[in-house]
C-alpha cells in the first residue's frame, strides 16, 4: 500500500467554500475507484500549503486505470478551480505500517525530512517518497492531541476537515 498526498494552497477566498464543498464530495468519488482504500482531508492553521488530502491506495497502478481517469483523476475534475491554486503538489509515499488515522479532535504534524537517519519524534511514522512530484525524500507523520506552540520551517500542523473515510466499493 502507498499514501497519496495532495497539498494545495487555495488563493481565492470568494471561491473557497464552493471549492471545499466540491473537494469533500470528490473524496467520495475517488473512494469509489477500486484501489482507493481511505481518504481524509485537512486544513493548516498557518500559511501555505493550507490544505492536505491523504489517501491510502493499493499501488501506483491505480492512477493508470480507466476507472480513475473516468472519475476525473489527475486533476481533470478540478480544472475550474485551477486559477485559484497557488500550490498543487502530489506525492506518493511507501508505508511500512497501516495508514495513519487522525481523529477529528486531534492534529496531524507533517514534517519533511531530508535524511532517513534523522531522529523520529515520539509516535511518528516515517514515509519514503516514491513518486509524482517528489517534493521531499521522506515525510514524518505524527498524530497529536493539540498543535505545537512553535514549528520548525519544515513542519506543518493540520486539523482534520473530515473524518477518515473508507472505500466505497467491494473487493
Image (tube, rainbow, N blue to C red):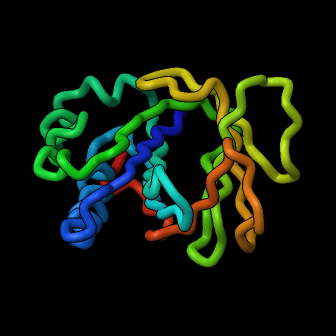
Asked if residue 150 is positioned above or below residue 117 in the image, the reply reads: below
Tell whether 160 sits left or right of 96: left
Asked if residue 3 is positioned above or below residue 123 in the image, the reply reads: above
How many marks on residues? 0
Asked if residue 31 is positioned above or below residue 6 in the image, the reply reads: below
Tell whether 114 sits left or right of 123: left
**Along the line of sight, the residue nearer the viewer: 3 or 88:** 88
Percent x, y for residue 40?
A: 46, 59
* Residue 25 visible, this angle: no
Q: Name the residue located 50 percent from the left edge and 24 percent from the top edge.
A: 134
**Along the line of sight, the residue nearer the viewer: 60 or 88:** 88
Tell whether 101 sits left or right of 133: right
**Along the line of sight, the residue nearer the viewer: 145 or 84:** 84
* Residue 160 visible, this angle: yes
Image quadrant in which the N terminus is located? top right
Asked if residue 55 is positioned above or below residue 61 in the image, the reply reads: below
Q: Name the residue located 73 percent from the left edge and 73 percent from the top edge.
A: 146
Image quadrant in which the C terminus is located? top left
Q: Quadrant of residue 61?
A: top left
Tell whether 114 sits left or right of 131: right
Percent x, y for residue 37?
A: 44, 47
Q: Name the residue located 40 percent from the left edge and 36 percent from the top edge.
A: 89
Percent x, y for residue 20?
A: 29, 66
Amino acid at each position: 500500500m502507498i499514501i497519496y498526498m495532495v497539498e494545495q494552497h487555495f488563493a481565492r477566498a470568494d471561491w473557497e467554500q464552493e471549492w471545499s464543498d466540491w473537494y469533500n464530495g470528490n473524496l467520495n468519488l475517488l473512494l469509489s475507484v477500486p484501489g482507493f482504500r481511505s481518504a481524509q482531508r485537512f486544513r493548516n492553521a498557518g500559511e501555505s500549503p493550507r490544505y492536505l488530502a491523504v489517501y491510502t491506495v493499493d499501488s501506483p497502478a491505480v492512477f493508470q486505470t480507466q476507472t480513475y481517469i473516468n472519475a476525473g483523476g489527475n486533476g481533470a475534475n478540478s480544472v475550474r478551480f485551477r486559477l485559484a491554486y497557488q500550490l498543487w503538489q502530489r506525492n506518493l509515499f511507501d508505508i511500512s505500517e497501516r495508514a495513519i488515522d487522525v481523529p477529528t479532535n486531534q492534529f496531524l504534524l507533517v514534517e519533511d525530512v531530508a535524511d532517513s537517519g534523522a531522529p523520529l519524534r515520539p509516535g511518528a511514522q516515517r514515509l519514503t517518497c516514491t513518486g509524482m512530484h517528489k517534493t521531499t525524500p521522506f515525510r514524518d507523520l505524527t498524530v497529536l492531541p493539540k498543535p505545537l506552540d512553535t514549528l520548525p520551517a519544515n513542519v506543518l500542523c493540520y486539523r482534520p476537515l473530515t473524518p477518515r473515510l473508507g472505500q466505497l466499493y467491494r473487493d
